[in-house]
Image (cartoon, rainbow, N blue to C red):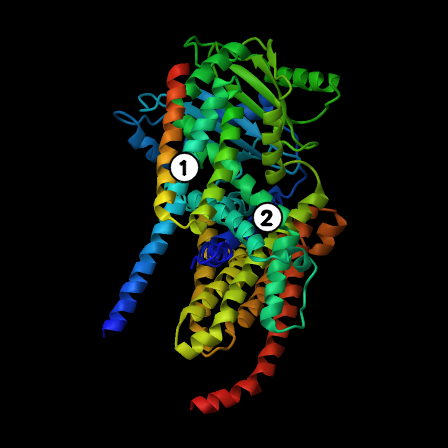
């Protein structure tokens, strides 16, 4: 195993890459889809197929919507064990109200945090969130699943395994393995730069698979390293290494006291009730101040802290549409009077680096070409891992066939499930989204079930058809599931047309790219899958005569 | 029979060695990385760096350290040394962080 440094690295690359590769496939694939999360949301919730909207008026739209919010039953039940004594049913003290939007959001995400009397950690709040149509304040029903930002995105970073944040830990560990696989992969291959330009599609199958693995790994190496690393950085302080909440909690508290003194933004409530001046006027004043600094822009994030208290303040942040940041240039006002408390000074050098790393990963800024390059990079990562699986199987399957080992067969069936099966599951949820009745209770849950059911069926199918691999042949499930992708992708486009009337001629002529783009991508997926399935079919018929003697010999 | 049981013992010992390396890389590596995150964060904060900036730099340092010690664990010849550095070093770094905190707070 460990006779030389290079062999040790090859061992790490092969075995960790194999085991965690299945998770990494999901992280890369759903990451690539999450690049267009808002667009999937529009496709999935036809009532929200409107143009992006700016942050609406607080007084006219936000305030009534905030006042209607309360934590859900589930949130209250989840909080129960962290409270001394009985859990209240209503939460009158609002710690924070906030709303976040980007240049791609027709609907507005709103968040509210409430004080919990008797909470074991007095700093802990209970949270509620909602989504509204910012034109009129109407609530978008919770059970209408935002398939992009509410499902593909959480899959990308946490597999939607919420229990003890298990999914976030699994994906984080896989990201570490991705980094280790990149480093060990470079060490394994001395001729890295020659491989950069090498792709021999007509050479022996094993060689061309390895070429494609190296090509997609090396060409996009900076992309892969950057995204795996910044993904870890984004979650490091909150999940992976929460030193500020645990070991260095006292240091963090000290910092908060100093910060509150320096910024004049109160850390705690005063306990004295107070009114609220016009927030719209504060927003207008913030925009005037940005413009005076030549930084005109929309509001990205609006926060009210300690609502209804004399210590309350309002923070207005400029959207990160025009730069690599989520939001910034915060301006803070005293809530009761509207008087200016503070304008955030320019960020420190370290904070700018942090903002750059986070901002480039999450891409809330406007750059459509880069957005598509992210999709390509994510797909390159998925191809790199998929070819890694195929190389693993192809290298071993004849030997395993002779030894009667099931190893290659199992890995191949899992590879089918994570490659074609995952695409099918993603298409399955889109199809379910257009087939289920509009007013079905808990509609979003049914969509999720459709996703997992499709994936489980793909696994069963891959396992059922895998016997060929144990004889050193190809699993026909690859070809069959690729045909299924063609059918599902075409069905999704067709069902969108039938159920909403938004066919491509209409969306393209109206220039409504969120829906047109998803439909066109689905058609492209169908075309690529059809081409692939046909060539897999030709390969299977070519392979057939040459295998017959072996079959005869066995008989 | 004796040769086949020798092979079995051999392969069990090999499995154990691999498990020990994986354990050291994953858990030992994490303990060491935690120590780095905590030590870098507290030392930078002591050097007047803003807390969240210090926390961010600590995370960067810790994550890169985790990657390096993870790979080192598989390349190293002596596992005893690996375990000692990762657990001992991690504990020392974490203790240093708590010490710095106790001076500052």
Asked if A354 appears above or below A284 in the picture, the reply is below
Residue A310 falls left or right of residue A405: right
**Looking at the image, which residue is at 57% across and 79% down?**
A540
Q: Chain of mark 2?
A: A
Image x and y of residue A47, in percent = 60, 43
Residue receiving disc 2: A224
Image x and y of residue A266, in percent = 48, 12
Image quadrant in which the C terminus of chain A is located: bottom left
Of helix, strand and loop, which one carries label 2? helix
Do marks 1 and 2 share a chain? no
**Looking at the image, which residue is at 72% across and 23% down?**
A295
Image x and y of residue B97, in percent = 40, 25
Return the residue nearer the eye: B24 or A6: A6
Q: Chain of mark 1?
A: B
Q: CA distance from mark 1 to mark 2?
A: 25 Å
Of helix, strand and loop, which one carries label 1? helix
Return the residue nearer the eye: A279 or A495: A279
Instruction: Answer few, some or many: residues within 10 Å of disc 2's Cα (few below 14, many 20 plus, some between 14 and 19).
Output: many
- For marks 1 and 2, give the one nearer the viewer: 1
Residue receiving disc 1: B32
């Amino acid at each position: 195993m460990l006779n030389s440094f290079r062999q040790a690295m090859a061992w790490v690359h092969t075995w960790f890459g194999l085991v965690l590769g299945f998770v990494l496939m999901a992280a890369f694939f759903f990451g690539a889809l999450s690049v267009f999360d808002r667009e999937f949301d529009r496709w999935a919730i036809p009532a929200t197929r409107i143009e992006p909207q700016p942050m609406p008026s607080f007084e006219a739209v936000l305030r009534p919507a905030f006042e209607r919010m309360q934590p859900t039953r589930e949130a209250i039940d989840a909080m129960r064990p962290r409270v001394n004594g009985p859990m209240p049913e209503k939460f009158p003290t609002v710690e924070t109200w906030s709303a976040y939007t980007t240049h791609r959001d027709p609907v507005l995400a709103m968040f509210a945090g409430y004080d919990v009397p008797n909470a074991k950690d007095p700093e802990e709040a209970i949270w509620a969130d909602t989504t509204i149509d910012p034109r009129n304040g109407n609530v978008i029903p919770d059970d209408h699943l935002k398939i992009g930002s509410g499902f593909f995105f959480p899959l990308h970073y946490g597999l939607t395994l919420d229990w003890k944040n298990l999914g976030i830990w699994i994906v984080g560990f896989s990201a570490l393995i991705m980094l280790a696989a990149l480093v060990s992969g470079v060490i394994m291959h001395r001729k890295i730069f020659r491989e950069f330009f090498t792709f021999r599609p007509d050479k022996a199958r094993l060689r061309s698979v390895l070429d494609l693995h190296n090509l997609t790994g090396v060409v996009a190496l900076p992309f892969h390293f950057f995204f795996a690393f910044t993904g870890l950085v984004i979650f490091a302080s909150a999940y992976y290494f929460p030193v500020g909440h645990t070991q260095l909690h006292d240091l963090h508290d000290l910092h908060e006291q100093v910060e509150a003194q320096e910024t004049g933004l109160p850390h705690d409530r005063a306990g004295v009730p107070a009114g609220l001046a016009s927030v719209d006027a504060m927003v207008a004043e913030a925009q005037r101040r940005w413009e005076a600094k030549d930084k005109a822009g929309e509001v990205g994030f609006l926060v009210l802290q300690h609502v209804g208290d004399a210590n309350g303040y309002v923070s207005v942040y400029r959207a990160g549409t025009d730069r690599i940041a989520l939001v910034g240039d915060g301006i803070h006002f005293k809530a009761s009077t509207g008087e200016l408390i503070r304008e955030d000074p320019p960020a420190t050098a370290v904070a700018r680096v942090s903002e750059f790393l986070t901002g480039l990963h999450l891409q809330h800024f406007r750059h459509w070409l880069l957005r598509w390059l992210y999709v390509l990079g994510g797909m390159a990562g998925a191809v790199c891992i998929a070819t890694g699986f195929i190389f693993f199987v192809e290298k071993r399957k004849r030997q395993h066939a002779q030894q009667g080992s099931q190893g290659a067969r199992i890995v191949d069936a899992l590879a089918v499930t994570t490659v074609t099966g995952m695409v099918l599951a993603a298409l399955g949820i889109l199809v379910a989204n257009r087939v289920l009745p509009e007013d079905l209770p808990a509609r979003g849950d049914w969509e999720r079930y459709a996703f997992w059911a499709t994936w489980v069926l793909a696994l069963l199918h891959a396992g059922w058809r895998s016997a060929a691999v144990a004889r050193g042949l190809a699993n026909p499930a690859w070809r069959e599931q690729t045909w299924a992708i063609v059918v599902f992708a075409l069905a999704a486009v067709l069902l969108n047309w039938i159920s909403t009337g938004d066919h491509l001629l209409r969306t393209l002529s109206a220039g409504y790219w969120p829906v047109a783009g998803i439909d066109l991508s689905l058609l492209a997926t169908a075309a690529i899958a059809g081409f692939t399935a046909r060539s897999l079919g030709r390969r299977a018929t070519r392979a057939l005569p040459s295998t017959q003697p072996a079959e005869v010999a066995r008989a | 029979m004796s040769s086949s049981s020798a092979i079995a013992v051999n392969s069990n010992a090999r499995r154990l060695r691999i498990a020990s390396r994986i354990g050291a890389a994953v858990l030992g590596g994490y303990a060491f990385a935690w120590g780095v995150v905590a030590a870098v964060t507290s030392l930078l904060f002591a050097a007047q760096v803003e807390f969240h900036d210090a926390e961010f730099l600590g995370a960067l340092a810790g994550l890169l350290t985790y990657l390096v010690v993870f790979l080192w664990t598989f390349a190293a010849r002596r596992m005893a040394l690996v375990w000692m550095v990762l657990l001992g070093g991690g504990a020392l770094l974490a203790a240093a962080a708590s010490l710095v905190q106790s001076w500052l707070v």
